[in-house]
Amino acid sequence: MEFNYDNLNSSMAKKRKTRQEKIILQLKRELAKKTPAPVSTSTKSKPRQGAISQTAKIEAKQARVREKTDVSVLSFDPRLIKRDLLKTLVLSLAVISLEVMLYLALR
């Protein structure tokens, strides 16, 4: 029994996406991120007025939380910058002191 590689490659070849298809898919993903998922409503019974106002308050709070997370991603925390600068300073001093010790030992 002989194995034919040419047959394998031709049967398993994938169709590559064109640039236009990639752009369309990217735009669909962005649109899906921007539009919220539709809330399914039950047809069995209508909610009371109090229940409707409660869900509106919950949705408003969730919207505020989403806005805060977007802002925090774009902003910076001064404590993190201070910590990074301190780490850089400590490592730099360690490397420089090692170089000085090696210079004095090998001189």
Image (cartoon, rainbow, N blue to C red):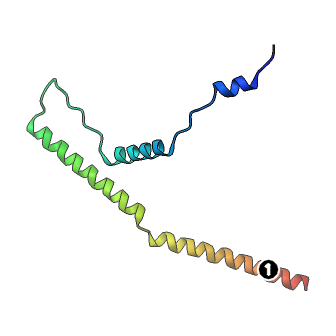
Residue at coordinates 57% horizontally, 75% vertically from top-left? 85
Locate residue 50, reporting x and y percent: 10, 40
Q: Could you tell me which quadrant the N terminus lies in? A: top right
Is 6 rendered above or below residue 54? above
Q: Which residue is mark 1?
A: 99
Residue drawn where x is 71% and y is 76% of the image: 94
* Horizontal arrangement in the rendering, residue 75 relative to residue 61 (left or right): right
Residue at left 30%, top 40%?
Answer: 37
Left or right placement of residue 7 versus residue 76 in this view: right
Q: Residue furthest top?
A: 1
Task: Judge whether 51 appears above or below 46 on screen.
Answer: below
| Image quarter of the C terminus | bottom right
Q: Position of residue 81 (x, y in %)?
A: 51, 72
Provide residue 18's location: percent of width, then percent of height. 51, 42
- Category of crowding for the residue at label 1, using alpha-carbon neighbours closer than 10 angstroms: few (below 14), some (14–19), many (at least 20): few
Residue drawn at (22%, 50%), measured in percent from left and top?
A: 60
Tag 1: amino acid: Glu
User: Label 1's element?
Assistant: helix
